[in-house]
Amino acid sequence: MEDKELEGFQPKGEPIVSFPIQIKHSAIIPFAKDMDKILCENDHKGGWRDCPITYLRSRLVEEVGEYFALVANNEARGKEAQRELIDIANFCMMLWDRA
């Protein structure tokens, strides 16, 4: 997601957390912004801390399957593939958070 797309975007729930961070790999920044945007779009579903780990694991497998379906159809580039990869990353983060 481009910074222009984030202008005016206000996530629901907790206030935005802003802190200085030094990173070597700049691709992390737009990736993390996209992760947060998708998480905020799904805030109405409740939190990952309140659902069973087995559910999170099965959703991760499902999202990986959806990405590989795109790969099999030679559609592993573009917005749809990026969205699936963000979904995978979000479920990984949720599992990491619960570990």
Image (cartoon, rainbow, N blue to C red):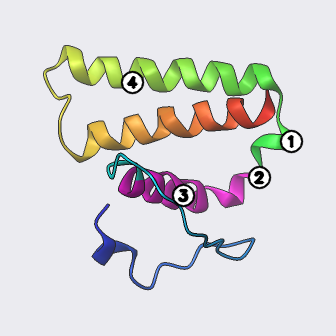
Residue at (28% x, 66% y) in the render: 2
Q: How crowded is mark 4: few (under 14 residues within 10 Å), some or many (20 or more)?
A: some
Q: Nearer the viewer, residue 71 or 19?
A: 19
- The residue that mark 2 highlights is 46
Q: How crowded is mark 3: few (under 14 residues within 10 Å), some or many (20 or more)?
A: some
Q: What element carries label 4?
A: helix
What residue is shown at x 79% (from left), y 33% (from top)? 98
Q: Is residue 63 above or below residue 49?
A: above
Q: Does the magenta stretch include residue 35?
A: yes
Q: Distance between the residues labelled 1 and 3?
A: 18 Å
In the rendered image, residue 29, in percent from the top left (x then y), is placed at: 41, 56
Residue 66, numbered label: 4
The amino acid type found where label 3 is placed reads Asp
- The reply, left or right, for residue 40 in relation to residue 44 is left
The residue mark sitting in front, 3 or 4, is 3
Tell me whether circle 3 and circle 2 mark residues in contact (CB < 8 Å): no
Q: Mark 3 points at which residue?
A: 36
- Eye-nearest disc, 1 or 3: 3
For numbered disc 2, what is the local secondary structure?
A: loop
The reply to whether dot 1 and dot 2 touch (C-beta < 8 Å) is: yes
Q: Is residue 87 above or below residue 72?
A: below
Q: Which mark is residue 50?
A: 1
Q: What stretch is highlighted in magenta?
A: 29-45
Where the C terminus falls, by quadrant? top right
Amino acid tagged 4: Glu
- Identified by mark 2, the residue type is Gly
Distance from Cα at disc 3 to Cα at disc 2: 15 Å
Q: Residue furthest bottom?
A: 8
